[in-house]
Amino acid sequence: MIFWVLALSACQPSEPVSGLPPEVATLTRPAVSPSGKYRLVLVEGAKDGVKALSFQVQDAASSQPVFSAADLFSTRTKTYFLWDAQDRVWVSAGTQGTFFWQKEGDAWVRYDFASGAAALPAFLKQAAPVQH
């Protein structure tokens, strides 16, 4: 019986996992950006009737949203949401790929990791090496 509980827990990518660094956000634990300006908050949704996740960047002081991503990422695969040292939001989403959002002026601009525009954060090099 304990085995089944552990196996089911391991399949829940949106739940906090012991040992995740503070820059990685979970549904129950937002992550504060390295500069301290922003909080990364996960948002539940649905895509084609399937549970999915997105994210919101909030002002850390007021908790007011400054950006809400339109993208939805399936919860059927392991998905990570995190900050890098330059206050970029990274999402590594199983078979969907790896992306980052960077603040440019007043907008948050999405980039595909494959563009080569930024180096992969160390956590993703270890946690999701197949994507890169």
Image: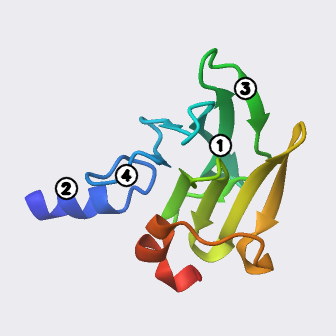
Three-letter amino acid code at disc 3? Pro
Q: Nearer the viewer, mark 4 or mark 1?
A: 4
Q: Secondary structure at mark 4?
A: loop
Where is residue 112? Give x, y as percent.
77, 70
Q: Would you say the residues marked 2 and 1 are in contact, meaning their CB atoms lie under 8 Å apart?
A: no
Which amino acid type is shown beneath numbered disc 1?
Answer: Phe
Q: Nearer the viewer, mark 2 or mark 1?
A: 1
Disc 4: which residue: 21
Residue beneath disc 2: 5
Q: Nearer the viewer, mark 2 or mark 3?
A: 3
| Residue 126: image tag | none
Seen from the viewer's position, the closer of residues 9 and 116 is 116
In terms of sequence position, does the residue under pointer 4 or pointer 3 come before the other? 4
Residue at 67% from the left image edge and 52% from the top image edge = 88
Q: Secondary structure at mark 1?
A: strand
Amino acid type, residue under disc 2 in the picture: Val
| SS label for mark 3 | strand
Q: CA gap, disc 1 to disc 3?
A: 10 Å
Q: To which residue does mark 3 refer?
A: 65
Disc 1 designates what residue? 55
Residue visible at 58% across and 80% down in the picture: 131
Colour scheme in the image? rainbow
The reply, left or right, for residue 110 in relation to residue 123 is right
Mark 2 vs mark 1, CA separation in Å: 28 Å
Quadrant of residue 126 within the rendered picture: bottom left
> CA separation, marks 2 and 3?
36 Å
Could you tell which of marks 2 and 3 lies nearer the N-terminus?
Answer: 2
- Whether residue 1 is visible, yes or no, is no
